[in-house]
C-alpha cells in the first residue's frame, strides 16, 4: 500500500489521475476502521486533509459553498446560521470524531446513514467535483448519491465540496439512535421551510438506499399551511389532522429495511414522529420570529 | 514508510506500515503506550491524543497523516513526578477502576478544561461522550472533573 501526502489540490488531482484506484481520505474515520480490522485494503491512499481548497467555505454568486474538507466541529463553530447542518454535525460521532470527520467523507462514503446528507438533500445542494487541470462539474445531490456506497464520482475526480442556495426560514435535523453520541442513525430527518418559495422540504436518512425527499408530504405541508393562512400569519394554527397526515406521508416516502439497528416498521413509525415534531418546531420558530420582528 | 512528527515537543521519526494508525505508531514504534488500544474504531476514546491541538482518536488517524504535524499524548501531561491537576483529581476522586479508559479520559478532560474553565454538567457529559468506561464508573469521573475544574480555576492567575 502506498500513501500520498499532496500539499496542493493540483498535486492531489494529478495523483488521482495517475492512480485512479487510490482512495482519498480526509478525517479517515471510516477508512481507518477498515484498515485497523483489515476489512478492505486500498492499493493507495491520498491524504486530502492538507488541501486548503477543500478546507474553506464561502459565499459565491448568491450561493454558499462548503468545502469537502470542512470538519463537523468547524461547522458547529463557524456556521451556526445553517441550523439543520449545525444540528446534524453535532449528532456525528463524538467530539473526537467531529474534529476529524468531514462532509466530503459523508459524500464519498455515501452511506444512507451519513448525518450531513439529509441536510444537503433538503438544501437541494449540488456536489462539486473536480479533476486534473481544475475542470469542475456540479451534480445535483440526487444524481450524485446513486445507492448504498455508490456515487457518480469518476475515478479521476475528487469531491471539492457542496453548493446550495441559502433559503430563508426555520429548519431542523433530528435523528433516532440508541444514545446521544457515537450512534449510527436509525432514522434521520431534515426539514427546511423556504419562506420565499412558500415550500416545505423534507429529506430522510437511513430509511432507503439513498437519501429520499418526501415530495408528497412536502406538497401537502405547503398546501396545508396555505389553506389555514399560516404563510401570512404564523399565529394561524395548523390542525392536528394536518400534522398526522404530514407524518403519514413522510413515512410513506421511506423504503426501509430490517437490520441490526431497527426494523423497517420502526423506521417508518420514526419517520412519522420526527416529521410531526419537525413541522411543529418549524411553526413555533416562525411564530417566535414574528414575535421578535 | 517514514513518518516524522513532533511528539510531546520532540521531533521523532518512525518507520511504519503505510496503513498503520497513529495509535500503532505511538505505542509500537515510539514507546508511548499511555494511549490505550481498545476498540480500534473510534468508539471508546481510550486512545485520545491531541493532533495539532485538536482532540482526536489516534486509532482513526493514519500515521502518515501525522507527518509534519504535532502530536501530544497523555505522557506529556505530568512534569516529572508532578501530576497534572486532572490526573491528581482522578486519583483523589477515585475516578479509576480498571484504569484502561483513564488515559483517554484524562486527555479529554484536560482538553475540555483548557477550553472552558468551568463547564456545566451538560457540557462535561457532551465533551466526554466519546470516552467509554466499561466499569461504568462515570459518577466519580464527573466528580474528578469538578474537582480539577475548581482547582485549576483557583490556580489560574
Image: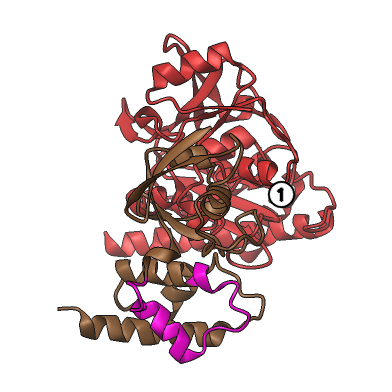
Chain colours: A red, B brown
Across and down, in percent, residue A22 comes to 61, 23
Callout 1: chain: A
Q: In this picture, which residue range is highlighted in magenta?
A: B78-105
Residue located 57% across and 15% down the image: A156
The extreme top residue here reads A133
Relative vertical location of residue B14 with respect to residue B135 in this rendering, above or below:
above
Q: To which quarter of the image does residue B122 belong?
A: bottom left
User: Relative to the observer, which residue lies in front, B21 or A17?
Assistant: B21
Relative vertical location of residue A148 with respect to residue A259 in this rendering, above or below:
above
At mark 1, the secondary structure is helix
Residue B103 drawn in magenta: yes
User: Relative to the observer, which residue lies in front, A153 or A203?
Assistant: A153
Across and down, in percent, residue A150 comes to 70, 29
Across and down, in percent, residue B105 comes to 50, 71
Q: Is residue B130 visible in the rendered structure shown here? A: yes
Q: Is residue A228 visible in the rendered structure shown here? A: no
Residue located 45% across and 67% down the image: B108
Across and down, in percent, residue A87 comes to 48, 56
- Residue where numbered disc 1 is placed: A249
Relative vertical location of residue A42 with respect to residue B68 in this rendering, above or below:
above
Residue A13 drawn in magenta: no
Amino acid at each position: 500500500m502506498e500513501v500520498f501526502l499532496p500539499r496542493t489540490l493540483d498535486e492531489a488531482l494529478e495523483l488521482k489521475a495517475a492512480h485512479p484506484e487510490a482512495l482519498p481520505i480526509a478525517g479517515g474515520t471510516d477508512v481507518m476502521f477498515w484498515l485497523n480490522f483489515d476489512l478492505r485494503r486500498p492499493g493507495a491512499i491520498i491524504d486530502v486533509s492538507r488541501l486548503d481548497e477543500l478546507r474553506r467555505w464561502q459565499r459565491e454568486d448568491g450561493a454558499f459553498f462548503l468545502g469537502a474538507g470542512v470538519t463537523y466541529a468547524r461547522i458547529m463553530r463557524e456556521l451556526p446560521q445553517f441550523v439543520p447542518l449545525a444540528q446534524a454535525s453535532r449528532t456525528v460521532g463524538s467530539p473526537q470524531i467531529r474534529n476529524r470527520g468531514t462532509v466530503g467523507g459523508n459524500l464519498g462514503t455515501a452511506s444512507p446513514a451519513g448525518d450531513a446528507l439529509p441536510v444537503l438533500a433538503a438544501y437541494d445542494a449540488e456536489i462539486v467535483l473536480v479533476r486534473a487541470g481544475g475542470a469542475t462539474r456540479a451534480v445535483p445531490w440526487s444524481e450524485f448519491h446513486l445507492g448504498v456506497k455508490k456515487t457518480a464520482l469518476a475515478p479521476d475526480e475528487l469531491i471539492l465540496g457542496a453548493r446550495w442556495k441559502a433559503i430563508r426560514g426555520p429548519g431542523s435535523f433530528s435523528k433516532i439512535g440508541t444514545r446521544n453520541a457515537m450512534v449510527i442513525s436509525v432514522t434521520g430527518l431534515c426539514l427546511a421551510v423556504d419562506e420565499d418559495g412558500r415550500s416545505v422540504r423534507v429529506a430522510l436518512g437511513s430509511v432507503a438506499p439513498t437519501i429520499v425527499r418526501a415530495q408528497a408530504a412536502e406538497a401537502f405541508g405547503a398546501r396545508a399551511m396555505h389553506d389555514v393562512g399560516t404563510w401570512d400569519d404564523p399565529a394561524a394554527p395548523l390542525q392536528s389532522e394536518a400534522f398526522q397526515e404530514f407524518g403519514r406521508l413522510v413515512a410513506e416516502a421511506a423504503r426501509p429495511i430490517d437490520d441490526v439497528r431497527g426494523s423497517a416498521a420502526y423506521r417508518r413509525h420514526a419517520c412519522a414522529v420526527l416529521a410531526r415534531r419537525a413541522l411543529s418546531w418549524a411553526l413555533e420558530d416562525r411564530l417566535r420570529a414574528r414575535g421578535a420582528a | 514508510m517514514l513518518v516524522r512528527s513532533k511528539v510531546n515537543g520532540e521531533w521523532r521519526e518512525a518507520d511504519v506500515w503505510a496503513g498503520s494508525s497513529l495509535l500503532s505508531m505511538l505505542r509500537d514504534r515510539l514507546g508511548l503506550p499511555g494511549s490505550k488500544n481498545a476498540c480500534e474504531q473510534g468508539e471508546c476514546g481510550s486512545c485520545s491524543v491531541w493532533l495539532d491541538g485538536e482532540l482526536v482518536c489516534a486509532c482513526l488517524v493514519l500515521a502518515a497523516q501525522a507527518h509534519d504535524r504535532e502530536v501530544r499524548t497523555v505522557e506529556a501531561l505530568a512534569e516529572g513526578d508532578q501530576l497534572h491537576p486532572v490526573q491528581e483529581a482522578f486519583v483523589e476522586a477515585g475516578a479509576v477502576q480498571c484504569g484502561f479508559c483513564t488515559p483517554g479520559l484524562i486527555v479529554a478532560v484536560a482538553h475540555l478544561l483548557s477550553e472552558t474553565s468551568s463547564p456545566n454538567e451538560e457540557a462535561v457529559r457532551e465533551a466526554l461522550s466519546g470516552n467509554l468506561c466499561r466499569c461504568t464508573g462515570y459518577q466519580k469521573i464527573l466528580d474528578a472533573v469538578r474537582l480539577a475544574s475548581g482547582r485549576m480555576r483557583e490556580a489560574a492567575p
